[in-house]
Amino acid sequence: MITFKLNGLEVQAEQGSTILDVARFYGLEIPTLCYMEGLDPWGGCRLCVVEIGEAPKSKLVSSCTYRVEEGLIVHTDTKRVIAARRMMIELMLSTAPMSKELQDLASKFGVTQQRFPPRNEECVYCGLCIRMCDQQMDARAIGFQNRGYKRKISTPFDIKSEECRLCGACMYVCPACAARCGGPNADTDICNACLQVEPTCLETYGELTCWMYDAGRCGTCVQETKK
Amino acid sequence: MDVQTERVNAFVRKHKNQKKALIAILQDIQAEYNYLPREALQQVSRSLAVPLIDVIGVATFYRAFSLKPRGRHVITVCLGTACHVRGGPKILEEFERRLGIAAGDTTGDGKFTLETVACLGCCAIGPVVVVDGDYHAQTSIRKAETIIKQYMNK
Amino acid sequence: MKAPTKLKTVKDLEQAIAAQKRLRAADKRPVVTVSAGTCGRARGSLKVLDALNASLRKAKLDKKVKVRVTGCHGFCEAEPNLILHPGDLFYQKVDPKHAEGIVIETIKNKKTIKSLLYKDPVTGKSAAKESAIPFYKKQKRIVLGDNALLDPTQINDYFSIGGYSTLLKVLTKMTPEKVIGEVKTSGLRGRGGAGFPTGLKWELARNQKGEPKYIICNADEGDPGAYMDRSLLEGNPHRVLEGMMIGAFAIGASEGVMYVRDEYPLAVKHVTMAIEALRELGLLGKNILGTGFDFDFQIAKGAGAFVCGEETAMIASIEGYVGEPRQRPPYPAEKGLGGKPTVINNVETWGTIPLILAKGGAGFAKIGTETSKGTKIFALVGKINNTGLVEVPMGTTLREVIYDIGGGIPGGKKFKAVQTGGPSGGCLPTSKLDLPIDYESLSGAGSIMGSGGMIVMDEKTCMVDIAKYFLNFLRDESCGKCVSCREGTQRMYEIVTRISEGKGKPADLELLEELAQTCKDASMCGLGQTAANPVLSTLRYFKKEFEAHIKEKRCPAGVCKSLIRFIVLPDKCTGCLACKKACPNDCIHGTLREVHLIDQEKCIKCGACYEACRFEAVETQRDEAIVIMEGAR
């Protein structure tokens, strides 16, 4: 067992536990977005950051990926941590303002201003869909492409993937997709989780192949080939 | 692009079928075809037993790779800090104007691809422009025209 | 030169080194050293070499004179340069047409050609010997100096200056613990930028359980404006390899990976040749020279990703993945390549090791400051007279490097800032010129040592534009994992861009600081954690410039396109039509000998006219004939 300090409290945990595991066990609330039980932790959204160590050498780390160490000092809600969490929410919200999950987080953590021009994308690049597709569904149909500000999530060559079984798990776990993608204006709104590009799958396939059964308004059907 | 499966497999074999040699294999393929053809990527995925999505992930992450066919001549303008301070961006703009394309694209006739690089490590001779491995030192807005003319008919 | 036969014992190598040293000492022929690194070649040094060889053959002196093609000597401004022995004569900016003259006048008749000598840009004084040139005088070139002495493609040249005798000493007379002890005593800190004590890193790795252990040479040198590592790898690869082998012995590693960036083809070539040479001689593999030391090299090429300079991203790249950094701990010394203990050090660090083991750590520790020992190589570039690679003891001030060695700012312009540490560093103003160069001083001032890039900027450089430049670089190079870095750099870029376009609001500066702080705090790896430094340092020292852009919609340096216009000064224009011809958009009116006029409606602000105005016939006419005038549009 490893002994360390959590918010001033001396706690014990098993070797290999993450700070997040332990904090939740002790009833502390740490917000997360890209973390999901059953999937490997990713540490990309930075919402779960906590402050470790002592001033002036303390630093922020993602609690979902940081394994506990003997004698570690952890604080889950310092000024620095709250400021970071708020900024992460503000940044993600400006990317995908239509996400209910992000809007809820904003209310909870007191993010009341939106200072960045909204991009109205449907993706915050949290990677849940990818890890779901890979680790739980064993399909590996989608993945990250490019890097930095050009990052995107797609199938190989942006066309219908041979690996994709249309299971919909990606959409199920997507925090940004909680609001609906596309609809009649789907040629401008692009949902990266399901690669819907045609507004009406009916026209392409002659029948609704969509498990969502959104009457052809959205669909998970993917364009066959892209020029 | 006619990609010979055997050629790709030869590269994979050259690197002892090691998954960790993926980047080196892609570099060999790019050197051979001047870009990474779709079929080549699919073949690498099969031969190396690496999921295609991961091969694509690597191919798009690194700047050295191009998934689109590149021109016969690749003009690379250095935009490192030293070259930037010496006027690199204005030289890039001149190339963009003269070739009629944006950085990253290829001219319609397939002659030139215009790219940028963050730093070539030749800051003393900046602003630097490299064409097909030839280094052009101390370029300027005016030299852009000369450089294009030099490679136009090759 | 015929390849020597395989070396099987310690004595074989000892004798091989001694033989080469003897041969070199016995060779009394005059020597012409041609500097042919990448920059030299770009400036035509290979053509100079061909012309030289042809002239020597013509004068029937080709067997009587030794021509040595070396890597870069560091004084890039003077390239292509030659050094002639005896006499240590330095000829700069040599052209192929000078070759004939050099062979007849200098080599045959032993006369100096004055026009080829170095001339100080400020005082006008000439200097004949390399050692008398101000650029070199204040330097202490213990690492880079050997570049001028050897042909990097010939291992025999390296033997001839005693190369690999330190490795022999280590393998036969020292224990790994003793080696680590010397490195610790020397106080050597990682030259890649972070400055972690090298001896400590080695010790941590040595004490780890886990086999096999690896060492990696970080030759990804991604900082724009830094090319020390390139020069060392091109010019003296064996020095670095020797350092790595010594390190491998100390740590207990059996495999070394050389990760070189894709953009350095000559460095890759020379390192590959060097490793091949070692292999041919039997100096790699199992039980090297019967000492029980197993070791071999592998080369991995980068593929154009700055983030791969980060330790864990580099490991991911070597393993065939995207260059996404991993959470630390565990640190690579504990769990690195393949989950095994791995030591990653920078090229310059490895290149300094043979020196420390040869002369002892204590001697090295005498150079430098209390906390930063030894020398450091800097790439002095940008708006500076003497561009080149500068190796100075730690503690030398910025002023000494920029003025005494660098020769100050060209064109009579004023110094404005010096950028150190690449995209993870910051810009330091005039008030910081007397700062001693060491790890703590630089980070205290808001910058970092970094890998050694030192970019000098003058009054015509806009600091808002510089901040924008670095943010653009970082948002492209970010791996994209962390929201704080990916979105942070993008949004900071957007804000600074708006400011540079005259669309900034006063609240922007606050938002910028807030965003910068969060990016610094919440990011997982060094790239994200230092991404805010360029912005924070320019805000710290040049806030007035940002405010001018925001409140007055004015760019004091005359760079930001939306805030300037180009005009012709009537009393300076000679009516030569140069600008008119250069203009791509046909916006300049005027005929020969008539004062030209720029049509502001059509002007696309490309700067071609500004560049073209150059009256060679009339000396006093300078670029100021076309002046950037402030004025919002």
Image (spheres, coloured by chain):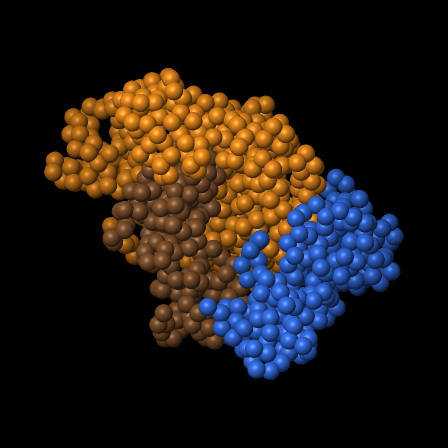
Would residue C135 appear left or right of C194 to someone viewing this image? left
Considering depth in this image, is B83 or C388 the residue closer to the camera? B83
Considering depth in this image, is C100 or A62 the residue closer to the camera? A62
- The answer to whether residue A46 is visible is no
Q: How many marks?
A: 0
Q: Residue at x 31, y 30 (%)?
A: C578
Considering depth in this image, is C101 or A100 the residue closer to the camera? A100
Q: Residue at x 86, y 60 (%)?
A: A26
Q: List x then y, in percent, for residue C564.
A: 50, 31
Residue C126, placed above or below residue A17? above
- The answer to whether residue C84 is visible is yes
> What is the residue that sits farthest to the bottom in this orientation?
A207
Letter of the blue chain: A
Q: List x then y, in percent, for residue C220.
A: 48, 49
Q: List x then y, in percent, for residue A185.
A: 62, 65
Q: Colour of chain B?
A: brown
Would residue C519 appear left or right of B7 to someone viewing this image? right
Residue C372, placed above or below residue A80? above
Considering depth in this image, is C458 or C296 the residue closer to the camera? C458
Q: Residue at x 62, y 52 (%)?
A: C486
Q: Residue at x 47, y 65 (%)?
A: B21
Q: List x then y, in percent, for residue B20.
A: 50, 65
Letter of the orange chain: C
